[in-house]
Image (cartoon, grey):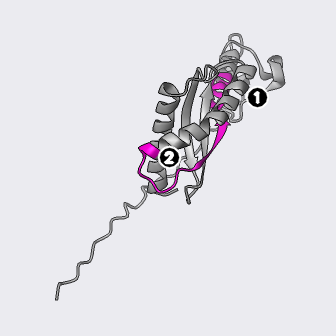
């Protein structure tokens, strides 16, 4: 992704958030936050990632309402921004906060002495870490997991000298 598309993505994220908060009067768009915008290099299409607070039915209604509001948002952006093309927006649900909460819940269960087999959905954590002994368990009984190895050395700084040609 180029710096230009990153700047356009950030500008669109901010402006779409402002328009949705201040100018869209649909009550179904209550607790929606624009978390990210990803545009294609030609700026014809953009994915708008939205985080929504609420139950599944409320989230679905909010996503539908946002899809219906996007033509209005595009018109507003066309009058506010000085870019050649306003992209076609595609709304996507950002569930990263929900997944993060689930991982934190799993970690809390593990710390409390639970095992993934005792938890609903029988989930396990993707990366194993060193196991600590529980009360009443000898430290020698615990199988140790080696820590990941670091690569030594520094990366080259990549300094370049600028060559200047003498003016004729």
Query: Which x, y percent locates residue 143?
Result: 72, 29
Q: Which residue is mark 2?
A: 9
- Does the residue at mark 2 contact the one at mark 1 (Cβ under 8 Å)? no
Q: Nearer the viewer, residue 3 or 74?
A: 74
User: Where is residue 29, by image quadrant?
Assistant: top right
Residue 124: assigned label: 1
**As displayed, is residue 31 above or below residue 82?**
above
Q: Nearer the viewer, residue 99 or 109?
A: 99
Q: Residue furthest bottom?
A: 168
**Local secondary structure at mark 2:** helix
Residue drawn at x 50%, y 46% is: 9
Residue drawn at x 79%, y 18% is: 119
Horizontally, residue 54 falls left or right of residue 34, namely right
Label 1 crowd bin: few (<14), some (14–19), many (20+), radius 10 Å: some
Res 71 seen here: yes
Is residue 25 magenta-colored?
Answer: no
Query: Which x, y percent locates residue 137?
Result: 71, 15
**Local secondary structure at mark 1:** loop
**Cα–Cα span, label 2 and label 1:** 35 Å
């Amino acid at each position: 992704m180029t710096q230009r598309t990153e700047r356009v993505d950030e500008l669109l994220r901010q402006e779409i958030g402002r328009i949705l908060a201040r100018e869209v009067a649909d009550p179904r768009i209550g607790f929606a936050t624009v978390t990210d915008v990803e545009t294609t290099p030609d700026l014809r299409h953009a994915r708008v990632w939205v985080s929504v607070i609420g139950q599944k039915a409320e989230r679905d209604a909010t996503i539908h309402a946002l899809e219906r509001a996007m033509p209005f948002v595009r018109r507003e952006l066309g009058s506010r921004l000085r870019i050649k093309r306003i992209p076609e927006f595609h709304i996507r649900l950002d569930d990263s906060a929900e997944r993060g909460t689930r991982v934190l819940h799993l970690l809390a269960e593990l710390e409390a002495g639970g095992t993934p087999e005792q938890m609903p959905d029988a989930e396990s954590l993707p990366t194993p870490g060193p196991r600590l002994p529980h009360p009443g368990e000898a430290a020698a009984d615990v199988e140790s997991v080696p820590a990941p190895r670091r690569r030594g050395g520094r990366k080259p700084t990549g300094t370049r000298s600028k060559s200047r040609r003498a003016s004729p």
